[in-house]
Image: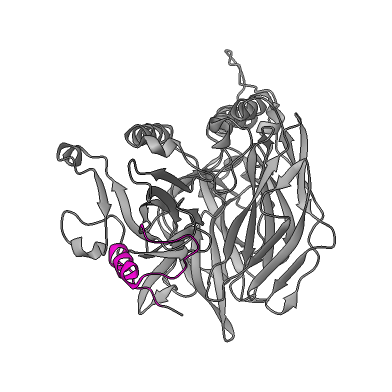
Amino acid sequence: MKKSRYYPFERNRYFYGKLLTVRDFESEQKYFNDKRRMMNRLLFGSGVITGLQVIAVDDKSVSVEMGAAIDALGREIVVPAPVTLKLSMMDGFTNNEYAKNVYLCIAYDEKGKEPVHSIANSSVRSDEVSEYNRVLESYRLFIREEAPDPSSFPMGDLTEQTIVLYQDANVRVLQVTPKYVNPGQTFLATIRIEKSLQIGKIELQYELATNRAEALEGRTVRFVEPQDAQETEYEFQVALRADGVGSGKALVGVKPGSAVLKAGDKQLDSISKDTATVQIITGPLQEQLMDDFLKQPLETSLDSPSDPCLYLAKIGLLQMGPTYVIERVEQVPFGEYVYNASASYRLAKAEAKRRRDVPEAGDQASASAEPKAAPEAEKAAYEIPVERRTPIAGAADIQTGWVDIPVSPFSKSALSFGKAVKSFVSQEIEHGLGTGSVLIVTSVEERTHDAFSDMLSSGQRSYFGAADVFTGSEFESALPDYQLGVVSYPQKGSFRVGIKVRQIAEARTVRVRWWAYRNGQAQEGDIETSPEIVSISEAAAGTENKAD
């Protein structure tokens, strides 16, 4: 695809008696436009600035709300009023099949406005000639039915490397690895699976092929889509550890001939043999990443397709007889945003305050095994904050800790007795009391940052049991109608925490505090749970456990 670039800027030089032509006036506009757009690209990047939400207004149409964006060429895109469009009437939409994902895109466009009679042209042509008196900086909306190449986004490979393991019209499998790690550091390879809704349940299995990297949980990678799931995107992590020999390159990929990828009963073609390269360096990771950014040539910083677009939404379609219905709409699926400097400053300041108020938030355990030798500040760059466990002083049989559970928005299709609900489950947590029966008590921790709550010392709250007890009062929880549950593994000395919530509007992280208590008479290896302990645990967690 043709790429765009900038040449040295030229501006008009005026002098008395100069004959100004169309070329001179066009050069005047081009000089200021190109300079502004270059600064947009270098200082702000590209993406949605504000608004531009995509909303399904009925089964076949969507509305794009008013908003503003900057494209990859630095051009401003403004949608001054909401616009409603039927998908099947948009450019790029094909009727070959309806069980698929499509992407709603927006691109900069210019249109002529105010046609006027052209006097100069009428002197050389007999027929009447009109020209546009104005150029309207506008936009166009269209559909793309294929997911974009991850490397096509500006600076997409600055901090991580993404390789496409498999791709067809209905399924795409990506592997994302960090660009740099330290010797001996644990890092995560993220496997992302994107699919259409009616393609069938996905099953993926393969053997890891690595060099200078150790798989902490075995070399077999396996994913089976849950039978009751209705998602179009899944993501899981594989924990690895770079060796401690020194600088060099670690390789992460798929062992040839080991991959099996199924969609329903259909076996898909073989997975790509591409291998990701993770650079092992001895210096600070953040400094190396910033150094890469600052030293890249101008041509690389301004590299962009000549006709770029922004992906406003991923729209999942279901086939209903001879036609389709819109099942769900995912906003800005590839994270193309431009963050306002003032908002970024305020968010950073709020995060710094939160870390001061909750010191333990900086001491987070990894979702995977601990690295052999890696600075804590560097380890946090690639490890997932999952949970922290702390013994209670003077009580050898009691442990406490917390776990952060990411909660993401979901559609109303996830119905339970007419209500939109969904469950989110933490990773496995070791309570530190060994094997056997334990009592697990949980609560949801919430913190607000406002002067009134701070004055009353009520900014931090812990909710035990059923949260809907406080609905409608000043003590109502910020989460909409949630329930907590715990599944314990007595033979392993571990457990998981689950939270079920009604439909939420934005992604957030829910912190759940837990306490684990062992009866003094319990013996190691005792896996029978006392009826008294079960009833107490159910009351404390506010859940209803059902035995199989």
In the rendered structure, which segment of residues is drawn in magenta? 520-546
- Residue 20: quadrant of the picture: top right
- Give whichever of 60, 513 is nearer the camera: 513
- Specify whether residue 115 is in view: no
Picture coordinates of residue 403, whole percent (x, y):
42, 50
Colour scheme of the picture: one colour
Total marks drawn?
0
Residue 366 left/right relative to 258: left
Provide residue 352's location: percent of width, then percent of height: 38, 32
Image position of 172 with respect to 455: above or below: below
Residue 168, quarter of the rendered image: bottom right
Q: Is residue 82 magenta?
A: no
Q: Which residue shows up at 68% across the image and 38% down it?
A: 179
Residue at figure coordinates x 57%, y 32% from the top left: 378
Residue 204 visible from this viewpoint: yes
* Viewer-proximal residue among 294 and 60: 294
- Residue 7, above or below 150: above
